[in-house]
Image: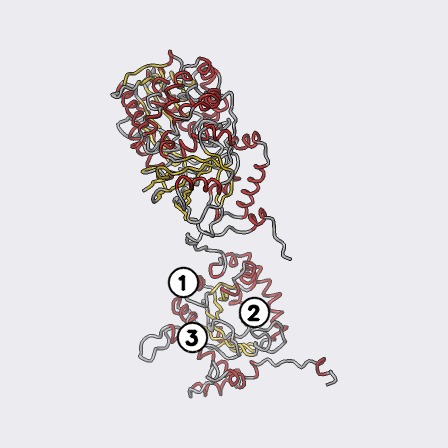
Amino acid sequence: MSPRPGFVLEVDRSTPPTVFWHGEGFRFERLPEGSRVVYPPEPLDGLVDPEASIRHALEHPLGDSAPLSALLKPGMRLTIAFDDVSLPLPPMRRPDIRQRVIEAVLDKAAAAGVDDVVLIAALAIHRRMTDDELRHALGDRVFDAFAPHGLLQQHDAEDPGALVHLGLTDKGEDVEINRRAAESDLLVYVNINLSAMDGGHKSVATGLASYRSLRHHHNVKVLQHSRSLMDRHHSEMHSSNWRMGRLIKAAGVKIFQIETTLNLDMFPSQFNFLQKREWEWSLADRAGFHATRLSLDRTPPRLARQIFQSMLSPYAVTSVQAGEVEAVHDVTLENLHRQQLVYVEGQTDILTMGLPYLCPYNVNSIMNPILVACLGLGYFFNLYRGRPLVREGGVCIMSHPTPWAFNPVHHPSYIDFFEQVLAETTDLVEIEKRYEESFATDPWYIHLYRTSYAYHGVHPFYMWYWCAHALQHLGAVIIVGGDRAAVRRMGFKPASTLADALEMAEDVVGRNPTITHLHAPPLLVADVS
Amino acid sequence: MSVRLPRIVEDVVSRPTWPGTLPRPIERRNIGVDYDTAWTRAPWARAVRRVLVDNVTRPFVAAVAAPKVFGREHLDALDGPVIFAANHSSHLDTSIVVACLPERFRRRTVVAAAADYFFDRPWKAALWSLALGTIPMERTKVNRRSADLAAQLLTDRWNLVIFPEGGRSPDGWGQEFRGGAAYLAKRCDVPVVPVHLRGVRPVFPKGSSSLRRGKVEIRFGDPLWPGEATGHDGREEDARRFAARIEESVALLADEAESDWWSARRRAAAGETPAFRGPDASPWRRAWVLPASARRTRRSRSRTSAKPW
């Protein structure tokens, strides 16, 4: 039976309770009659032979690119950049698709006699990857061949010697990227396109860029006009990246883009119930869900976090395309939408969502309150095309424990941002104007970013800005089951139960509101008419 | 006092309710007319069935019904697949027909059985299809799947036992023959052998839960070929007309069973064969004229009669 598309369920009296993610746990909520639930499509079938598909893509490139084997010459400088630990989510079971693609590229490079090859993790201002994470992403063969010789590098956005300024776009945006990548005869970028936001010119223009360059599209104004981040034609952030990408190309940087898409098979078999619709749960699904929920309620948060963070997804690869950046990305979007798009009629007064334990910036780490806000208002709110799921002035209700907890190694600047900046103000523009520069240039944060495993000092600001469009659009944000102090610190309203939250929301949107629940993850993009 | 299970146990044990706003998908379960009987025709299952029929069914039928077989010679000339169309008054009919078939037919025979009765539970479906080689037959409406399966089996040279009345007689009289046997015979161009069972109802009638020993007679008639007769208007006989001819043949065998071959033949030639379906009258009158061979009288209860009054 072919996978069923996503759809919108109208809740009635006989609709069973709906699963809400709640951090490292779940809530089982009965939504009011008349509410809508947007369900994601079922996972598409994966490619039968991913290796063959990769080889085919490399030799049959899209756009005006020559086949990869024709671009490889002895004596050339080849750089292979790849997406960092923030993708995919959750991390995929071995072999990671990056490993498969990079091995295929290296096979061709070896056959062509290319000696000068460097691999670069395109971190932008994310934390550096650990050796274990690199080994998982690239596989033992690649890691053992490159890492011992210093040929497996991680992009350093604060190393002046490792950056090169390529010029300004017609809008005056600095384009400063990794020197090795820019000065190579060929830059191969290996993407995992988990969502429509990833890939395209954003890969190089963001992944290999410096703060000087990033600040042009990671700012309040641009993000307020990115509607949405999943719709690149209406996203100012993507427009900025596209301008930069075209400038990079014009500067002579030859990029061979490889993009891959995955299906929505996100959770291992013990979490099968997350891939199914509640009324179709088998006895095993019901037993699995309730046993998991009850045991997680009694598990110390630290242990629960370890359990969830060790989860690996059985993703299947649904497409591989390679060649010229824009041509490749157009096909990638088609493949992504084939898997993720759900048509939704009309907006809603109240949007509810259950937030999981993971966002791109807390892999093997803690989901701190800023990341909770970023995941809900930056990512989930933006999972739309056309119009937001919730109307202007509507309410967003998110379910997450939102602990006042931070990983001091990964998120040192987040602690200060939360304790100092948000204690003063939550206003985006004021924060940007008063505090961003000092955090971005703080030598201690830079030191930790470059030598430890810390996110850049400015990263919490960007996460906060990520909420810009939602905060401008919404009338109120309510977090169910969260740490009340942490929720209030961010300017949101805490609620103990969903019923309480819905009652509070009525004060904002009026009586008898329309309610829509986003049943994600697995990921979906709502095409709202 | 009712005991209520803890909420969590209820949530796990009870199936989730289905949203009223969604159409329920049609579940194709392996049950009823959809039951897949292919496994019962595998060599191992046929071997098991052979052992069961030879060592359980036939001794059992001999013990309770002591069947006498007439007209077996009509089968001698038949080689290919055959449809055996019999009257039906008891659950024992199937076992008796199967037990009394010549071995060359018995080893390769399936029985059309009511999908809603013999295939309504997985265990019943498995038991009867293994023990007697039953296949599910929809009897309340025309079902393509039932017909296709039976036709495929006839094409594969399996013999078919079918009860064209579609169910057991409620009062001992015959019922109208439906067109299934005739349709299959025409579709697969195979002969229909009319079969009459006499005296089975007293042994195990419909609605009874107890067996009573009796003497059963089974008669095989002349094979009937589709298309060998023409309709009133001279056109080729259709399935409905062929079904009526099968019913007439069974009625002739019934008359023969109640009288003798020669008398029955003469009555048939004169168009005076007694009505197979009984008189068109009130239930008590139908019961009044029911042949003794189809009646089951209540046994006298010695303990009751011994009471002082």
**Closer-to-camera residue (A295/A458):** A458
Asked if the residue under mark 1 is in contact with the one under mark 3, i.e. CB atoms within 8 Å, the reply is no
Q: Is residue A182 left or right of residue A478?
A: left
Using the image, determine if residue A321 lies above or below residue A161: below
Asked if the residue under mark 2 is in contact with the one under mark 3, i.e. CB atoms within 8 Å, the reply is no
In the rendered image, residue A404, in percent from the top left (x then y), is placed at: 52, 27
Check the picture and name the quadrant holding the C terminus of chain B: bottom right
Q: What distance separates the C-alpha of mark 3 from that of mark 2? A: 23 Å
**Closer-to-camera residue (B27/A455):** A455
What residue appears at the point 33 percent right and 20 percent down from the top-left corner? Answer: A186
- Please, what is the three-letter code of the amino acid marked with disc 1? Arg
SS for dot 2: helix
Quadrant for residue A232, please give it.
top left
- Which residue matches tag 3? B224
**Closer-to-camera residue (B281/B206):** B281
Q: What distance separates the C-alpha of mark 1 from that of mark 2? A: 27 Å
- Disc 3 residue crowd, few under 14, some 14–19, many 20+, Cα 10 Å: many
